[in-house]
Amino acid sequence: MAETAPLRIGVLALQGAFAEHIQVLRRLGAEAVEVRKAEQLAQLDGLIIPGGESTTIGLIAARWGLVEPLRRWVQTGRPIWGTCAGMILLAEQATGQKAGGQPLLGGLRVTVNRNFFGRQTESFETLLHVPALGPEPCPAVFIRAPAITAVEPGVEVLATLAVAPFLRPGFRRRGAGEEAAAGSEGATETAPKTEEAPAEVIVAVRQGTILATAFHPELTDDVRWHRLFLEMAAQSAANPVPANPSMAPSGQTGDGQPADP
């Protein structure tokens, strides 16, 4: 019996935690490659956009002529996974952006709050219950992480996270004679004071061939998220999904509201 060629998975290698994804994919038997040029996309069975700084990744992608090729990749229905910053870039709408907005690839019909969980120093680890991965909880590393605050029909919620009161949008605490924002750097600017703070937010979703996680599975020893994505890539390779113009990304650059520095 002829051996099946390993899946060829690209990891966008412009900035951020791309090397860690490469290592996990190779441990699982995939052919993992760093992607920096548009012409590399045609040779892939799946693509990961890693965590990092979403504005920086977007700016480098724009400078290197990758934004439109990446948007077309999403439109073709081939598997793509965004982690942390990658999730922001795949979102149709993002709040809490820097002034002037940032390039978004779009395609994932959600609204993402860019720095929902706060600054780098407010990063944390926790365990998530994810039925799609099995009964055992999975470790999740949140680093200056976003969260999904709204989804449209057709988006499957894979994991949610209860939100501590001090992290909820709109919460403000007082100290040293002045009122200081807590939680998301941008949320206090974008969330109306009358907005009801959510008790939980969405941190992992799947929409057809698009997977998105607000955290960093590549920084843990749990490889189930990467296995899930490889299964999606294998299914797509066996049964290619026709391009769907109806899910074409909007190409918008976000709400442009002022947020974190």
Image (cartoon, rainbow, N blue to C red):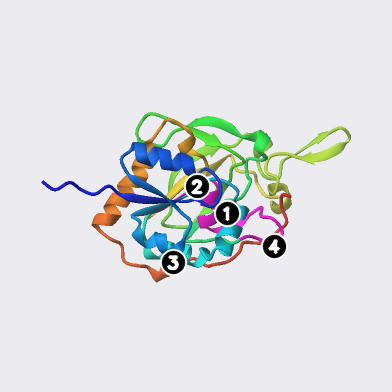
Q: Residue furthest bottom?
A: 245
User: What's under tag 1, amino acid-wise?
Assistant: Ile
Q: Quadrant of residue 134?
A: top left
Which of the two labelled residues, at mark 3 and mark 1, occupies the earlier sequence position? Answer: 1
Quarter of the image holding residue 153?
bottom left
Q: Is residue 143 above or below residue 61?
A: above
Q: Check disc 4 and report its element: helix, strand or loop.
A: loop
Query: Circle 3 — which element?
Result: helix
Mark before the other along the chain sequence, 1 or 4 = 1
Q: Looking at numbered disc 4 in the image, what kind of residue is underneath it?
A: Gly
Residue behind mark 4 = 100
User: Which residue carries the number 3 mark?
Assistant: 72
Residue assigned mark 2: 50
Of the two numbered discs 1 and 4 in the rendering, the one whose residue sits closer to the viewer? 1
Instruction: Give how far apart the Cα atoms at labels 2 and 1 are.
Output: 9 Å
Count neighbours of disc 3 (C-alpha within 10 A) and say few if under 14, some if 14 to 19, many if 20 or more.
some
Q: Specify start and end residues of the magenta stretch as a single range.
A: 80-102
Q: Is residue 250 above or below residue 186?
A: below
Cα distance between the residues tagged 2 and 3: 18 Å
Indicate the secondary structure of the residue bearing disc 1.
Answer: helix
Viewer-side label of 2, 4 = 2
From the image, tell me which residue sits under label 1.
57
Looking at the image, tell me whether mark 2 or mark 4 is earlier in sequence order: 2
Q: Earlier in the sequence, mark 2 or mark 1?
A: 2
Task: Mark 3 and mark 1 in contact? Answer it, CB < 8 Å.
Answer: no
Residue shown at 38%/28% (left/top)? 136
Q: Verify CB contact (< 8 Å) between mark 2 and mark 4.
A: no
Q: CA distance from mark 3 to mark 1?
A: 17 Å
